[in-house]
Amino acid sequence: MILVLRAKEGRCPEGALCVRIAEAIPVGPVHVPDGDYLVVMSSLIPKFVDVSSISRRFRRVICVGPETARAVGECIVPRRYDSRGVAEMLRALAPGRAVVLRSAKGNDILKRLVDSVVEVPVYDLAPDPIGLERAREVVEAAEAVVLSSGFVAEIAHRAGLLAGKMLVAIGPATSEVLARAGLRHYTSPTSTVEAAVEYAKSLLRPKP
């Protein structure tokens, strides 16, 4: 069994068990400044702000990953589903100010890579005690554990869920968190839960 630890509900890939161990909490009134490009980093964002209304003030809307695109509607999706992919897309577009809607627990990779970026925290993340208890009940049976974000990796590590397991990070940012913790792991070539689960399956298959 492949255990996916994540911060949101949703469809779980075939052959995996998904457990939410963090929950999203709104940060309060959100002020979104004007700009040229609106970047939506997560499919959770539309639950807390009216993206369709806000997007009318921008030239283009960029969604990070197909799941976020489904939640938002009309937008363009970078080839890479992470901050580096957004940076590549912004460099390819006409110069302009990018306003990034994200989690308060997000990393600063995009601000380091691109000038004229304004980040707006829309929600925060907190450990989900019920989910963590559920994860403790099932982790022993897991052949591999997929970590869906850096914050999820942090709280799973603190809860003692990762020791002795094959670990798969969903992307580079999550990989950095696991590396700082000294945990050996693999990184999915594509930053989606579905791709990470398929990658974990490929690692578990007997080699010829």
Image (cartoon, helix red, strand yellow):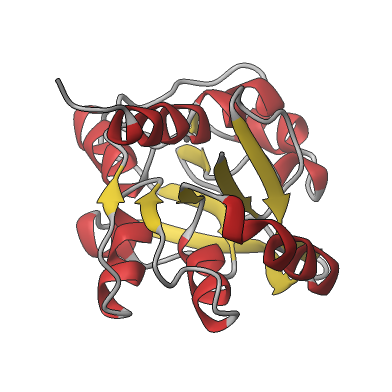
Residue 26 on image: x %, y %: 80, 64
Q: In the displayed image of the protein, which residue is found farthest to the top?
A: 74
Quarter placement of the C terminus: top left
Q: Is residue 13 visible?
A: yes
Q: Quadrant of the N terminus?
A: top right
Q: Is residue 174 left or right of residue 128?
A: left
Residue 77 lies in quadrant = top left
Which residue is drawn at the image coordinates 28% and 78% (left, top)? 180
Residue 110 figure quarter: bottom left
Q: Quadrant of residue 163?
A: bottom left
Q: Position of residue 66 (x, y in %)?
A: 53, 23
Residue located at (52% from left, 45% from top) = 41
Q: Which residue is painted at 54% across and 83% down in the image?
A: 158
Please say if 75 is above or below 137. Answer: above
179 or 99: nearer the viewer? 179
Compared with 133, 46 (above or below) is above
Q: Nearer the viewer, residue 48 or 55?
A: 48
Measured from the top left, where is residue 21 in percent x and y? 70, 62
Residue sticking out furthest to the left? 208
Whether residue 30 appears in this view of the structure is no
In-image side of 15 versus 50 (left or right): left
Count all numbered tags in the image, as a single digit.
Answer: 0
Left or right of 29: which side holds 107? left
When the figure is inspected, residue 73 is found, relative to residue 159, above or below; the finding is: above
Q: Is residue 53 shown left or right of residue 55? A: right
The x, y position of residue 155, in whole percent, is: 57, 75
